[in-house]
Structure formats: structure tokens, C-alpha cells
Image: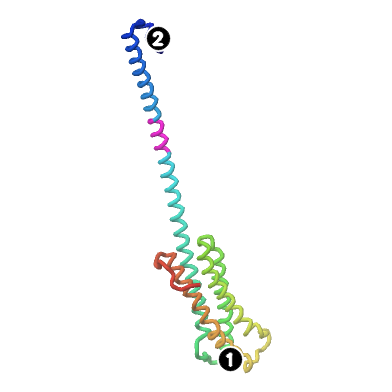
Amino acid sequence: MLEMFLTAFGGGAAALALAAFLARKFVDLQVSKALARYKTELEQKSAALKTELSIYAHEQNVGLSRIDEQRSNAIQEIYGLATKWHEIYLEICQPEEPDFPTAEMKLQHYYNWSTNLINAAEDLSIKVRDSAIFFQEDSSIVIGRFGMAATKISCQFYDDTFGKVDMSKDPKYDALFPLIEHERKKLASSSEGEFSHLRDLLIEEFRKLMKAEREPRVKL
């Protein structure tokens, strides 16, 4: 390029200086054009990246919102089933022996208690299993412990009462009713402490997940 300018302007010192000056200007101009083009391309890529990140963030927020909604629904359903089970449990553990007009009605009521307790525990266990994907591991442990305790208590009570009776035959009320009363009192005294602790943990975990409790007070 310098030779081209020297040819055009001659070989004198002034011509050489002018050629050098014009060469620098030409280079500066080319560099400026290249930088402007690079800046434009960079801005376009930056704008495209911001758009992609914005779309990604929106998709993530939508996904998290859906998970939060599904988790919230799961919490309500699990808590509802847990409450239903606990209500049956409290009926069985009532301090006074229930009174009925006939022995048959009393037997049927006891049997309904026992089977309803198992059915409620089963419904709770199924819901806990199906909803596990919406909870982190530490929350799943708290929920799972409550569900396992409810199932264990329900099955144990049935096994210790009607599991020992052949319901296809006429039951011996004089032996059966004292047995059931003994197991009712045993259930109330042996499991209430541990179960109450697990229930408190469950409630506090749900409150924390629902943003109603910042830090748990009950320790595992």
C-alpha cells in the first residue's frame, strides 16, 4: 500500500510523509469499520442470547410454578387423608367404652373401626407414594415416617383383635369384647406419644413447604 502511494505522489520526503499519513488513516478506517462490524455482530449475538435466556427463565418459572401448585395440592390431599386417619384413630382410643343396644351392633362398630383404620392408612400410603416426586428427600422422609407409622398401627390393631377371630363363626362376645377393650387401651397408651411427635413433624414440614413456617422447631 505504501508503494502504491509513493508511486502516485513521487519519492520526495513530503510525498513519503503524506503517503505514510494516508496509509495510517486508511488502516485506521479499516480497523474502525472492522470494530464497528464486530460490535454490531456482538450486539446482535448478545440480544439473541438475552432473548434465549429470557425464554429459558420464563420456561423455568412456569415449570417451577406448576411444581409448586402440584406440591401444594399434594400437601392438601395428604394432610386431608392424614386427618381422616387420625380421626378414626381417636375414635378407637376414646377413654370410655362405647355403649350399643345389642352385642351385634357393638361388634359391627368395632369391626368398622378396625377396617376403616386400615383403609384410611392404605389411602394415605398410596397418596404419599404417588406424590413423592413433588417433594425433596428430607420432606419425603418426614411424610413417609408418618405414613409408615399409621400403617403399622392400623395393621397391628387389626391383627391383635379381629385377626385372632374367625368372623365366619359366631364370635364369643364374653372373650372378644374384653380383648378389644384391652387392645384399645393398649393402642392409646403405647402409640400416642410417638405418633404425636411424627404428626407434629408432618404439620411443621407442611407449614414450612407452604411458606407458613420458616424454621422447624420439632427435631427428628
Dominant secondary structure, magenta: helix
Farthest residue in the bottom direction? 174
First of labels 1, 2 by sequence position? 2
Q: Amino acid at mark 2?
A: Met
Residue 17, horizontal then vertical, whole percent: 33, 12
Q: Which of the pair 195/169 is nearer the observer?
A: 195
Residue 134 image position (x, y, % from top left): 51, 60
Residue at 53% x, 92% y: name it: 101
Q: Nearer the viewer, residue 101 or 177?
A: 177
Q: Is residue 140 left or right of residue 35?
A: right
Q: Which residue is mark 1?
A: 103
- The amino acid at mark 1 is Ala
Residue 182's quadrant in the figure? bottom right
Asked which quadrant contains residue 26, the reply is top left
Seen from the viewer's position, the closer of residues 17 and 24 is 17
Q: Which mark is residue 4?
A: 2
Q: Is residue 49 magenta?
A: no
CA separation, marks 1 and 2?
A: 122 Å
> Which quarter shows the N terminus?
top left
Q: Position of residue 152 (x, y in %)?
A: 59, 76
Extent of the magenta region: 39-48
